[in-house]
């Protein structure tokens, strides 16, 4: 005996004539049942049309765009919050006074983080974290692991090297996120990149002040200049929504490069003075990269465009600042870069010696809050976030950990290795 | 001839939609708002049939599009028509809404329509039938409602419904069968009542 199955019913509803003539519908009970259910289905069909309220139709789109804008900002803040979350550093007690590690300048939370990373995190998690992007689950793990190098570094030079390596990683993340169309992640990565570069520059300046290390400065400067080329290319290739963040990073990087390059006095120039004296990235760079496809030849053109800016300049005479007690030589900027506008000289580093000995780098002025994006508009949200981060940064001597590459090796080699990691990662 | 033109129009529309989706995936809000213009009415209608309240339907429509914006990066992996994907989000939104407001019964049962009936008697009968069917659909289980609406109101085929709901085609046919049986039972009660 036949009965109505879902398949028979579906066939009957789609092609009633075929199903009705088939063997399955030969039984009167089955035929009756099929016809009955088909009537129910047909009763559903002519449901009356529901018209959207004209007012809702007119306003709904604008309301949706507002909701999207709010949602995007909320998610971006959450990403930044995850990036900067450092609550655990204040909960770890300090090391004993005579502990060798403490004497070596290693803070307790650095050791705690290292132990935590080694004991609780499996290699799978670490591997997953390595390829993560801002917003991914394991991204905080990646930040913690990379920051170990900075925390465990015992000299300002090593910290600067580690931070430049971390900045390189942020740049790769920004590129990858931009390539995938992840605007929020691109913004977060490029903001973090600027922070890392700025911090590295500050450590480098202090290292230079303590003991001139022109080789290190030149290596860092070369690395940053290569990163600038990469950043310019990434900006051109990015989706429109992600371009302002990359443009902001590019502008900030140009200022930092000028501050980092070896000056005539052999000491790095003050960031604030350089920020006022150095023009923003030239339009020629982006004009040279205006086409979406960046060929090696074009990169060479960009490098050639940048080379006059990036090459070390002759050392200016040293002028010792007698106003403060800091013996750091203050170079005469006008001798290196003739600029008509007299930028205010930054106040002398009036922090106590103890503060400085804790490893807190001198904070460069003209931070992210005052930075201007590519469109010439100040981002108020970014400014607020930057202020909050700045106040956090003032309270903590170190932010992250990481392994430092050998920046004294040829810079092209270092960046080549970074570039070789890039295409296959995160997929 | 007319069928060929219709196919061409459909192809052009879907091509445009694909371009809009691609732009929206890359973060273009204007492209997404164009997608909103294309599908808002259909999503609204789908929600309205299940919620039965204009204000709630409008809120849920906005919510569906906001969730779609958040998850649009994942859309390409589903390989379903965009509207089917939206209706799946709408289905989940309505289920969630029903859980929150299970004590509230829809009060606005008569849909707003500008239909004009020439014959008042036919209008009364049709309205009675419509109301009975709608009331019966609202009493179905959520997944039964979804399949019935996607199949007999939106006219999606089985593969699309299956892909949208994450079920097999056979499963969709089974749900359709059970839903029609249940609907028939509810309608017979309506008639008796």
Image: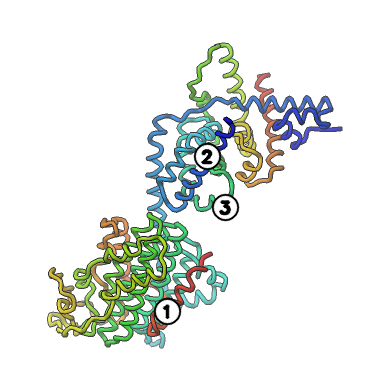
Q: Marks 2 and 1, how far apart in space?
A: 55 Å
Q: Secondary structure at mark 1?
A: helix
Q: Secondary structure at mark 3?
A: loop
Instruction: Give the color scheme: rainbow, by chain, secondary structure or one colour.
Output: rainbow
Q: Residue at x 49, y 46 (%)?
A: B68
Q: Residue at x 44, y 63 (%)?
A: A134
> Looking at the image, is mark 2 or mark 1 nearer the viewer?
1
Q: Marks 2 and 3, how far apart in space?
A: 26 Å
Q: Secondary structure at mark 2?
A: helix
Identify the chain of the residue marked 3, using the numbered disc in the image: B
Question: Do dots 1 and 3 share one subunit?
Answer: no
> Looking at the image, is mark 2 or mark 3 nearer the viewer?
3
Relative depth, front residue between A185 and A13: A13
Q: Residue at x 29, y 70 (%)?
A: A254
Question: Do dots 2 and 1 share one subunit?
Answer: no
Can residue A267 be seen here? The reply is yes
Can residue A109 be seen here? The reply is no
Identify the chain of the residue marked 1, using the numbered disc in the image: A
Residue behind mark 2: B97
Disc 1 to disc 3: CB gap under 8 Å? no
Task: Give neighbour class at mark 1: few <14, some 14-19, many 20+ (Cα, 10 Å).
Answer: some
Identify the chain of the residue marked 2, using the numbered disc in the image: B
Tag shown at residue B77: 3
Task: Give neighbour class at mark 3: few <14, some 14-19, many 20+ (Cα, 10 Å).
Answer: few
Instruction: Give residue A165's position: percent from left, percent from top.
Output: 40, 76
Residue behind mark 1: A414
A68 up-or-down from A221: above or below: above
């Amino acid at each position: 005996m036949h009965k109505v199955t879902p398949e028979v019913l579906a066939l009957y509803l789609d092609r009633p004539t075929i199903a009705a003539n088939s063997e399955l519908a030969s039984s009167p009970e089955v035929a009756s049942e099929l016809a009955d259910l088909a009537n129910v289905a047909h009763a559903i069909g002519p449901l009356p049309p529901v018209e959207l309220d004209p007012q809702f139709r007119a306003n709904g789109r604008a309301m949706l765009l507002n909701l999207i804008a709010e949602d995007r900002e909320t998610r971006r803040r959450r990403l930044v919050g995850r990036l900067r979350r450092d609550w655990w550093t204040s909960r770890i007690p300090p090391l004993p006074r005579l502990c060798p590690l403490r004497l070596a300048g290693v803070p307790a939370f650095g050791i705690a983080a290292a132990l935590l990373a080694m004991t609780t995190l499996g290699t799978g998690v670490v591997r997953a974290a390595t390829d993560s992007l801002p917003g991914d689950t394991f991204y905080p793990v990646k930040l913690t692991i990379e920051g170990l190098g900075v925390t465990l570094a015992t000299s300002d030079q090593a910290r600067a090297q580690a931070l430049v390596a971390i900045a390189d990683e942020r740049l790769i993340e920004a590129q990858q996120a931009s390539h995938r169309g992840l605007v929020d992640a691109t913004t977060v990565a490029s903001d973090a990149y600027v922070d890392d570069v700025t911090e590295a520059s500050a450590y480098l300046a202090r290292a230079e002040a303590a003991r001139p290390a022109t080789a290190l400065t030149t290596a860092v400067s070369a690395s940053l200049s290569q990163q600038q080329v990469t950043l310019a290319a990434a900006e051109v290739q990015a989706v429109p929504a992600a371009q302002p963040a990359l443009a902001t990073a590019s502008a900030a990087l140009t200022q930092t490069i000028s501050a980092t390059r070896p000056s005539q006095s052999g000491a790095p120039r003050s960031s604030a003075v350089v920020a006022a004296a150095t023009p923003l990235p030239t339009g020629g760079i982006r004009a040279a990269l205006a086409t979406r496809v960046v060929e090696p030849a074009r990169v060479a053109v960009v490098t050639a465009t940048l080379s006059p800016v990036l090459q070390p300049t002759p050392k200016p005479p040293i002028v010792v600042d007698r106003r403060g007690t800091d013996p750091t030589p203050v170079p005469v900027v006008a001798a290196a870069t003739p600029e008509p506008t007299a930028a205010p000289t930054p106040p002398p580093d009036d922090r106590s010696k103890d503060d400085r000995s804790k490893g807190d780098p001198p904070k460069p002025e003209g931070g992210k809050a005052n930075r201007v994006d590519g469109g010439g508009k100040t981002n108020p949200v970014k400014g607020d976030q930057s202020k909050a981060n700045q106040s956090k940064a003032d309270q903590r001597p170190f932010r992250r950990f990481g392994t430092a590459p050998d920046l004294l090796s040829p810079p092209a080699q270092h960046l080549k290795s970074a570039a070789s990691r890039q295409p296959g990662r995160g997929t | 001839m007319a069928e060929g033109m219709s196919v061409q129009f459909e192809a052009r529309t879907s091509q445009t939609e694909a371009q809009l989706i691609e732009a929206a995936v890359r973060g273009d809000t204007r492209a997404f708002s164009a997608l909103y213009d294309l599908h808002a009415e259909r999503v609204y209608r789908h929600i309205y049939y299940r919620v039965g309240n204009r204000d709630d339907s409008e809120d849920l429509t906005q919510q569906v599009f906001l969730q779609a914006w958040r998850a649009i990066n994942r859309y390409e992996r589903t390989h379903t028509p965009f509207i089917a994907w939206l209706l799946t989000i709408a289905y989940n939104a309505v289920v969630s809404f029903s859980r929150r407001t299970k004590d509230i019964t829809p009060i606005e049962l008569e849909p707003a329509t500008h239909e004009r009936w020439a014959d008042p008697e036919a209008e009364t009968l049709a309205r009675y039938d419509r109301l009975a069917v709608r009331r019966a659909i609202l009493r179905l289980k959520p997944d039964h409602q979804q399949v019935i609406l996607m199949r007999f109101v939106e006219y999606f085929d089985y593969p699309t419904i299956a892909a949208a709901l994450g079920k097999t085609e056979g499963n969709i046919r089974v749900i359709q069968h059970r839903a029609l049986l249940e609907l028939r039972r509810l309608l017979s009660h309506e008639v008796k009542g």
